[in-house]
Image (cartoon, rainbow, N blue to C red):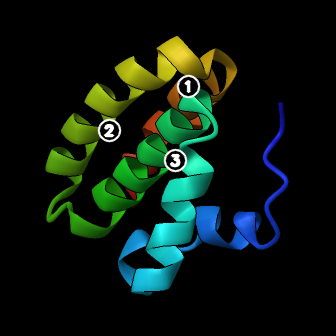
């Protein structure tokens, strides 16, 4: 069963903190249609939070490792891509 609500893509990819009250109500209706979609959305928001609020590379990497453990369960290929050597070497840029 797919989510076909008009405007759902916009609501799913936009920063949660930038959604209006009406947007949040509509998003909640969309997320109630699928447990998997809710998990994916929450993980997306957590990933964004790691990126936006980590104050040091070390703290960001620590949080990212925890996130990757969860991501591995749901998104094995994506987690493997993030863990690939080029991604680990990104810390050398900072």
Quadrant in which the C terminus is drawn: bottom left
Q: Residues within 10 Å of mark 3 (few under 14, many from 20)?
A: some
Of 18 and 89, nearer the camera is 18
- Residue 52: quarter of image: bottom left
- Does label 3 or label 1 sit earlier along the sequence? 3
| Residue indicated by mark 3 | 41
Residue at the image position 56 percent from the left and 68 percent from the top = 26
Residue at the image position 52 percent from the left and 47 percent from the top = 41
| Residue indicated by mark 1 | 79
Q: What element carries label 2?
A: helix
- Does label 2 or label 1 sit earlier along the sequence? 2
List x then y, in percent, for residue 9.
74, 64
Q: How crowded is mark 1: few (under 14 residues within 10 Å), some or many (20 or more)?
A: some
**Cα separation between marks 2 and 1:** 10 Å
**Disc 3 vs disc 1: which is toward the camera?**
3
**Disc 3 vs disc 2: which is toward the camera?**
3
Q: Is residue 75 visible?
A: yes
Q: Are marks 3 and 1 in contact (CB under 8 Å)?
A: no
**Cα separation between marks 3 and 2:** 16 Å
């Amino acid at each position: 069963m797919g989510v076909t609500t008009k405007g759902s893509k916009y609501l799913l990819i936009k920063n949660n903190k930038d959604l209006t009250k009406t947007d949040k109500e509509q998003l909640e209706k969309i997320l109630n249609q699928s447990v998997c979609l809710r998990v994916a959305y929450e993980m997306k928001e957590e990933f964004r939070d790691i990126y936006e609020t980590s104050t040091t590379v070390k703290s960001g990497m620590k949080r990212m490792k925890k996130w990757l453990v969860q991501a591995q369960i749901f998104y094995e290929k994506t987690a493997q891509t993030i863990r690939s050597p080029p991604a680990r070497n990104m810390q050398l840029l900072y």
